[in-house]
Image (cartoon, grey):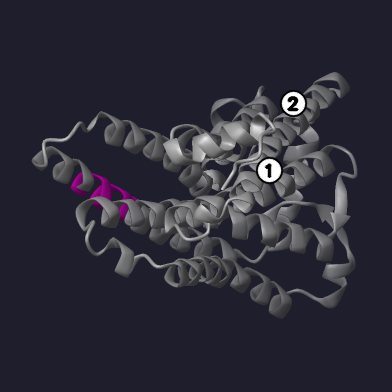
Amino acid sequence: MNASSANMTVVLQYRDSFTKAVTKNVIVVVLGISINYINAGLIHTFRKHQIFYTNPRYILFIHLVVNDMIQVTLAIILFVISYTIYKLNVSLCCILVLLTLFTTENTPLNLACMAMECYIAICFPLRHAQICTVKRTWMVIGLMWATSMLSVLPDLFITMATEPLDFFHSRVFCLRQNVFPNPLIVKKRDVTYVVFLVMVWLVIFYTYLRILFTVKLARKDASKARNTILLHGFQLLLCVTAYVGPQLKNALLLWFPKNYTDSLFATYIIIQMLPRSISPIIYGVRDKTFRSYLKQHLMCKVRIS
C-alpha cells in the first residue's frame, strides 16, 4: 500500500460525524475571520500613517501580519475542502499546498529577523539606523520568500520528474504527502526542518539573551523586555511545531486512536491559528506608538498632521 492509500484509509476510518464536522468547520471559519479582521485593522493603520513606512520594525511586523493573513486563509480553505469537496484536482491542490507551505515557513524566519532587529536596536543603538535601513529590510523580506521557496519548490520538481502526467489530472485528498508522494521528499523535508529549527532557535536564544544582558548592565527595567521575550518564545514554539507536524500526527494516531480526528483538530488550532493571534497582541497592543494610531483607527478618528 502506498502513502496516498494509507492516508486515505486513515481518513476514512476516523471521519467525524456530521454534527461534529459542522461544529469544527464553524469554529475554524469564525476563528479565521476574527484573526483576519483584526489583522486587516493593523494593515489599515499601517497604510494610513507615513511614520511606519520608514521604520524597519513595523515593516517586518506588517509583513508578518500579511503573511499570517494569507496563511490563515489558505489553511481555512484546505480545512473546509477536506470536509466538503473531499477530493481535489492534484494541480490545484499543489498550488494551495505550496502557498501554504511558503507562508508557514516564512513565519519563524520573520520572527528571527524581528529578533535581530530588536537586538541591534538595543545592543547597538548608535548603529541601528545605518544597519537597519528600509531598503535592507525589504531585501531581507525578499530573502525570506526566496529561502522558503528554495525549501519547498524541490518537492514540486521531484514530483514532476517522477510522477506520470496523468497524476496531475487525478483527484486526491488534499494533503502534502498525497500531492508530493515521493519518499525522497520526506527525507528532504525532515533534513530541511531540522536545519530551520536549529537556525531559528539559535538566533532567538542568542539575540534575546544578549538583549537581557545589555538591559541588565544598563540598569534599566527589564520586565517589558522579558515579557516580550516570553511572548516571542511562545509564539515561535507554536510556529516551529509545524516542522514536526508529520511526527506529531503519527504520535497522535498511536496515542489516541479513538480520538484521532479530535486530536488533529486541537493540533490544527494550536499550530495554525493560535500563533497568528499572538502577533496583534505583541505589536498591535503592547507597542505604544502603534497602539496610539490603532486606537484612532478603531475610534474612527483622523489624526491631524
Q: Residue at x 19, y 49 (%)?
A: 210
Write down the quadrant of residue 250 in the picture.
top right
Q: Residue at x 43, y 71 (%)?
A: 136
Amino acid type for the residue under numbered disc 1? Ala
- Label 1 neighbour load within 10 Å: few <14, some 14-19, many 20+: some
In the rendering, at what x and y percent does residue 275 appear? 53, 38
Q: Quadrant of the N terminus?
A: bottom right
Does the magenta-highlighted stretch encompass residue 212? Answer: no
Label 2: state its secondary structure.
helix
Q: Nearer the viewer, residue 136 or 206?
A: 136
Q: Which residue is mark 2?
A: 27
For the magenta stretch, what is the residue range?
Answer: 201-210
Tell me the CA gap for discs 2 and 1.
Answer: 20 Å
In the rendering, at what x and y percent does residue 180 appear? 68, 63
Residue furthest to the top:
19
Q: Which mark is residue 130?
A: none
Q: Is residue 268 visible?
A: no
- Asked if 53 appears above or below 231 in the picture, the reply is below
Q: Which residue is mark 1?
A: 40
Label 1: state its secondary structure.
helix
Amino acid type for the residue under numbered disc 2? Ile
